[in-house]
Amino acid sequence: MRTVPMSEQPGLVLDVGSMVLHVKDLDEGLRFYHDLLGFQVTDGAHRGCCHRVKIGAGASELVLLEIDDHTPLAMKCWGLDSPVQLRVSNFAQAATFLEGKGVRVERDDEHSGVVWDPSGNAIGLHDHPPGTATGKGHRSQPACRRR
């Protein structure tokens, strides 16, 4: 068997297996991500002091992890942008639906914006095709200054 040097391999990481999102209440998180956004529960568990559940949409997977000292996932220092971006088929329709359910929504433009889950996590939503920029902030805003 021939060993291929790392420099000749196509890439070390194959894909993003899952992302962990901290929530302060797992039941509230499930009502938001499962009942409103349509994620499907793929696995649930209770380990010691922590409750977690895996939810999926297409090939994507989030792990909701309930922790006592939850700090909400915040937006970047400029504009309506979040490190977690979820793609929807039609942002305007999704935003209107979520607003009707009492969810806080801030629109960046007609194709993207941010919603806040019950734990205060800022979650980006957009309807851009895969591989394209999502929202105005990605194209026109300067990088944040490090402190």
Image (cartoon, rainbow, N blue to C red):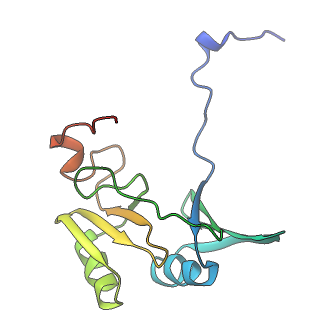
- The relative height of residue 52 versus residue 7 in the rendered view (above or below) is below
The answer to which of 44 and 72 lies nearer the viewer is 72
Residue drawn at x 25%, y 36% as measured from the top left: 143
* Residue 9: x %, y % from top left: 61, 17
Q: Position of residue 31 (x, y in %)?
A: 54, 84
88 left or right, relative to 33:
left
Q: Count the labels in the image.
A: 0
Snapshot quadrant of residue 25: bottom right
Q: Position of residue 6 (x, y in %)?
A: 65, 14
Residue sitting at x 35%, y 82%: 103
On-image quarter of the N terminus: top right
Q: Position of residue 94 (x, y in %)?
A: 31, 76
Write down the quadrant of residue 116 in the picture.
bottom left
Q: Residue at the spot x=57%, y=22% of the render? A: 10
Left or right of 144? Residue 51 is right
Rendered view: 139 above or below 95:
above
The residue lying toward the viewer, choosing from 114 and 93, is 114
Judge whether 6 appears above or below 133 on screen: above
Instruction: For the C terminus, give its image quadrant.
Output: top left
**Residue in the foreground of this view, choosing between 96 and 90:** 96
Q: Nearer the viewer, residue 106 or 127?
A: 106
**Residue at 58% over, 41% down:** 15
